[in-house]
Amino acid sequence: MAYSYDDQNIFAKILRGEIPNNTVLETEHTLAFRDIAPKAPEHVLVIPKGAYVSFDHFCNAASDAEILDFHRTAGRICTALGVEPGEGGDGYRAITNAGENGVQEVPHFHLHILAGRPLGPMVVMR
Ligand code: AMP
C-alpha cells in the first residue's frame, strides 16, 4: 500500500520554515527540536527532513544516508543532553508513536527523546 503524506502537517510547516521551532541540532537530512509541550524536563523530537509518515515508512523507504544521519543525530542528542547511561547519565526513553493505535498526533515520523526524571512504566496495562 502506498503511504499518503499530508504536507500540511505541523512538522512539514516547521521544515519549510513556515512556523518557528526551538532547534537543538540540524543536519543534512535531520532536524531535532524541543517539543512544544514537554512531558519531561528534557523532551526533544528528532525528525527526518524527508516526507515520511511513520517509523515503518521511514525504515522501508528512506535512503541509507537518511537512516544513518537520523540515527547519528539521535545519538548526538543523547550526548548533548548528557543522558547516556553508559557515560554516567541517568538514561532516557526514545519513543515513536504510529497510527491510530500508537496514538500518533502528527503524521510526520518523529522520535521522542524524553529524559530528566524517572519515566515510569513503558505502557500502562488495561
Ligand atoms: P505524537 O503524538 O507522537 O504524534 O507527538 C506529537 C508531538 O508533537 C507532541 O508531543 C506535541 O507536543 C508536539 N508538537 C506539536 N506541535 C509542535 C510544535 N509546533 N513544535 C514542537 N512540538 C510540537
Image (cartoon, rainbow, N blue to C red):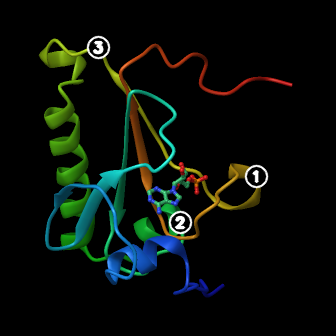
Q: Earlier in the sequence, mark 1 or mark 3?
A: 3
Residues at badges 2 and 3 in contact (C-beta under 8 Å)? no
Q: Which mark is residue 26?
A: none
The Cα–Cα distance between marks 1 and 2, rounded to whole angstroms, is 13 Å
Q: Amino acid at mark 1?
A: Asn
Question: Element under label 3?
Answer: loop
Of circles 2 and 3, which is in front? 3
Badge 1 density bin: few <14, some 14–19, many ≥20, Cα 10 Å: few
Image-based side of 116 in relation to 65, left or right: right
What residue is disc 1 on? Answer: 101
Q: Which mark is residue 54?
A: 2
Image-based side of 102 in relation to 83, left or right: right
Residue depicted at x 58% and y 85%? 6
Residue depicted at x 51% and y 45%? 37
What residue is disc 3 on? Answer: 90
The Cα–Cα distance between marks 1 and 3, rounded to whole angstroms, is 30 Å
Q: Amino acid at mark 2?
A: Ser
- Quadrant for residue 76, please give it: top left
Q: Amino acid at mark 3?
A: Asp
Q: Looking at the picture, how far across and down is residue 45, in whole percent? A: 38, 51
Q: Earlier in the sequence, mark 2 or mark 3?
A: 2
Badge 2 density bin: few <14, some 14–19, many ≥20, Cα 10 Å: many
The Cα–Cα distance between marks 2 and 3, rounded to whole angstroms, is 28 Å
Residue depicted at x 67% and y 27%? 123
Question: Element under label 2?
Answer: loop
**Foreground pick, 73 / 117:** 117
Q: Earlier in the sequence, mark 1 or mark 2?
A: 2
Specify the quadrant that holds the C terminus: top right
Badge 3 density bin: few <14, some 14–19, many ≥20, Cα 10 Å: some
Residues at badges 1 and 3 in contact (C-beta under 8 Å)? no
Question: Element under label 1?
Answer: helix
